[in-house]
Image (spheres, rainbow, N blue to C red):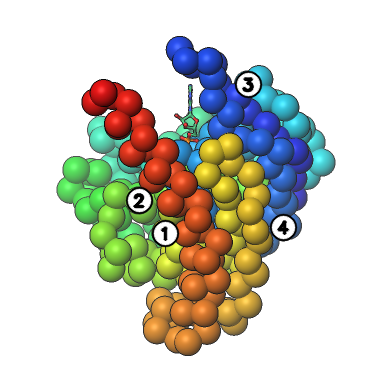
């Protein structure tokens, strides 16, 4: 379904340029849930933007169902790190919005939006405005709105990054339920090891800048899953496995940031 083939992306900067991604390849088969994890600054959002068609001027190829991604694509539904609900629309209107744009008749789009809100666990909140919801509820509204497009690929960049860990674990249950019901092909970008192992079939561990594939960890935990799984020995083993690969990369990232600070001070 999704093929990222040998992608390299350089950004021009004042001090010569930075290679954000180098020869990165990965694949997501139909119906699978893949998580990409890497330290801050390793190129995760760059990858997200490239797959979403928001970045030009990279080497390599991105294919969806064999078709090259060229600009923003209806087949890719993006959920951003920053909250992106429309504050002037109710929850129901937010989710119905893309259907309105697509010309779906009013009765049908409201019915579909209601069903999507049920799916993300927001039944009863249809007439609330985003300001009246919690951060997690707003992000679920954003997910429901993205799903309204019926994208082939659901692409999420740290959608719960701003939330506390307990809330994230519980939101993970909702994400697992959505995936179970829709069998939606999903690529989740995260810096949380727990989140990656809780949700994904495969975890792609990225190296620190330039970002390339360090290792693929298969998560062979049975489905259906829920957040109770985090206390199982099997879960602990997988977290340790991901961390053993991530640790060196995260510490490279930390050293890089600290040496930049030193330069700034001196
Ligand atoms: N538009 C841009 N111009 C210049 N450098 C960029 C741009 N976008 C990202 N970068 C650089 O590319 C690297 C990867 O960034 P990003 O993809 O945001 O990482 P992550 O999401 O993993 O934290 C960083 O060093 C960042 O400063
Ligand atoms: Mg990012």
First in sequence: mark 3 vs mark 2: 3
Side of 214 relative to 241 (left or right): right
Determine the CA span between mark 2 and mark 4.
26 Å
Label 4, residues with CA under 10 Å away: few <14, some 14-19, many ≥20? some
Instruction: Please name the residue that numbered disc 2 is placed on.
Output: 161
Q: Residue at x 30, y 32 (%)?
A: 261
Is the residue indicated by label 1 positioned so its CB lies within 8 Å of ligand 2? Answer: no
Q: Is residue 143 visible?
A: no
Label annotation for residue 30: 4
Q: Position of residue 12 (x, y in %)?
A: 54, 16
Q: Is residue 9 visible?
A: yes
Instruction: Please name the residue that numbered disc 3 is placed on.
Output: 56
First in sequence: mark 1 vs mark 3: 3
First in sequence: mark 2 vs mark 4: 4
First in sequence: mark 3 vs mark 4: 4
Determine the CA span between mark 3 and mark 4.
26 Å
Side of 140 relative to 154 (left or right): left
First in sequence: mark 1 vs mark 2: 2
Determine the CA span between mark 3 and mark 2.
26 Å
Determine the CA span between mark 4 and mark 1.
24 Å
Q: Which residue in the rendered view is the most extreme toward the top?
A: 14
Determine the CA span between mark 1 and mark 2.
8 Å
Label annotation for residue 192: 1
Q: Residue at x 54, y 19 (%)?
A: 17
């Amino acid at each position: 379904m999704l093929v990222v083939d040998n992608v390299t992306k350089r950004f021009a900067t004042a001090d010569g340029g930075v290679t954000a991604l180098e020869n990165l390849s990965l694949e997501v088969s139909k119906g699978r849930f893949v998580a990409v994890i890497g330290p801050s600054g390793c190129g995760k959002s760059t990858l997200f933007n490239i797959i979403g068609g928001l970045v030009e001027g990279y080497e390599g190829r991105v294919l969806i169902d064999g078709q090259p991604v060229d600009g923003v694509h209806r087949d890719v539904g993006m959920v951003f790190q920053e909250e992106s609900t429309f504050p002037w629309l109710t929850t129901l209107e937010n989710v119905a919005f893309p259907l309105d744009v697509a010309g779906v008749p009013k009765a049908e789009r409201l019915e579909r939006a209601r069903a999507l809100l049920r799916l993300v666990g927001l039944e009863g909140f249809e007439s609330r405005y985003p300001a009246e919801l919690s951060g997690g509820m707003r992000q679920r509204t954003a997910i429901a709105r993205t799903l309204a497009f019926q994208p082939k690929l659901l692409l999420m960049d740290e959608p719960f990054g701003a939330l506390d860990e307990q809330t994230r674990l519980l939101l993970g249950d909702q994400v697992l339920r959505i995936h179970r019901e829709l069998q939606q092909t999903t690529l989740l970008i995260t810096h949380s090891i727990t989140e990656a192992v809780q949700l994904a079939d495969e975890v792609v561990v990225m190296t620190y800048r330039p970002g390339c594939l360090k290792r693929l960890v298969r998560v062979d935990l049975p489905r259906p899953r829920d957040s109770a799984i985090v206390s199982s020995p099997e879960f602990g083993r997988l977290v340790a496995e991901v961390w053993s690969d991530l640790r060196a990369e995260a510490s490279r990232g930390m050293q890089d940031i600290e040496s930049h600070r030193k330069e700034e001070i001196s």
